[in-house]
Amino acid sequence: MRSEARPVPWGEGATLAECLATATRQLAEALALPPREARLEAQILFAHALGVNRAWLIGHDRDVPPAAPAIEALLLRRLAGEPVAYLLGEREFYGRTFRVTPDVLIPRPDTELLVDVALEHLPPRTSHTLLDVGVGSGVVAVSLALERPLCRICGVDLSAAALEVARANARALQAQVELLVGDGLDSLSGRRFDLIVSNPPYIAAADPHLGQGDLRFEPHLALAAGGDGLDLIRRLVEAAPGHLETGGWLLLEHGWDQAGAVRDLLHGGGFSGVFSARDLAGHERVSGGHR
């Protein structure tokens, strides 16, 4: 359940520094954040509500905020647990700002590894066909389109609402991406690609983390996949050979403790060159193989 929001205690005439200190303390207590992280969140929320940057906050810390009700409303929503990305309506990914809504997963740094690994299989100034299964907000497909503009990129997602977000991001960033509504590879009969990438749902349906933190607010359909979290990955491994050109690669993001199981599935599916790539924390988070 969402935690109950606490009332903001600052009164009329409180300075920006006093309001930030109160917000920092409340965020740290309500969300169990380290002080530095709570301070950063407070600054981000205040800057967004006031339409300024964080440097402005520092230079005007003795001022009385000109839009205290707007700040309080935003802070109360965060104290109730709403993710910062949804409150701001945007999130940075691969050096670019993407629009996000509650219809899509919040882009995370872990997924940048999927883009990195895909780019290693796509030499610059070459033309390939790519497919992103479960495109969501479009961060992977759009990033690849911008990094490899000669490639032809398609994204498919079961959620029409998610695809609207992806289309908005593609337009805003001037990326050429074909976006289709459909149930994964089942909706792409007859089409083949040089590379298929996916950040599919991979959390076990009974995982208690689904009821904690930001995950409480994200679309369940994009998070959980069966008893062990691998149902969608199994489907992709089984279906991908029918949609890959000879030598084409399938690249999958997965949980930090699922690499061995995913490699076994790839081997069992007849893939060659099976491997796993590690993120900056040393966890194997992306696995793949070629047809």
Image (cartoon, grey):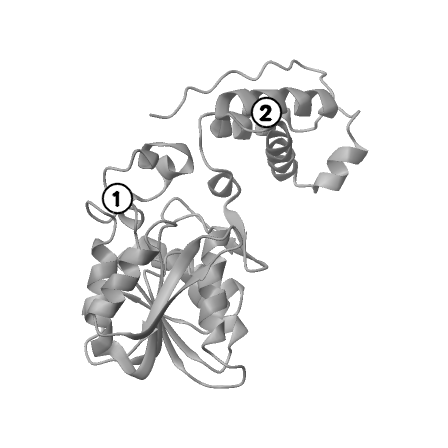
| Camera-side mark, 1 or 2 | 1
Q: Quick one: 105 or 71, which is closer to the camera?
A: 105
Callout 2, which amino acid?
Pro
Q: In percent of the image, x 49 and y 17: which residue is there?
A: 6
Q: CA distance from mark 1 to mark 2?
A: 41 Å
Q: Are marks 1 and 2 in contact (CB under 8 Å)?
A: no
Q: In percent of the image, x 37 and y 67: which residue is there?
A: 275
Residue 278 pos. (x, y %): 46, 58
Question: In what quadrant of the picture does the N terminus appear?
Answer: top left
Residue 151: quadrant of the picture: bottom left
Residue 25 pos. (x, y %): 61, 20
Residue 203 in the figure: left or right of residue 17: left
Callout 1, which amino acid?
Ala
Residue 180: quadrant of the picture: bottom left
From the image, tell me which residue sits under label 2. Answer: 69
Residue 246 in the figure: left or right of residue 177: left
Checking the image for residue 204, the label placed there is 1
Question: In what quadrant of the picture does the C terminus appear?
Answer: bottom left
Checking the image for residue 196, the label placed there is none
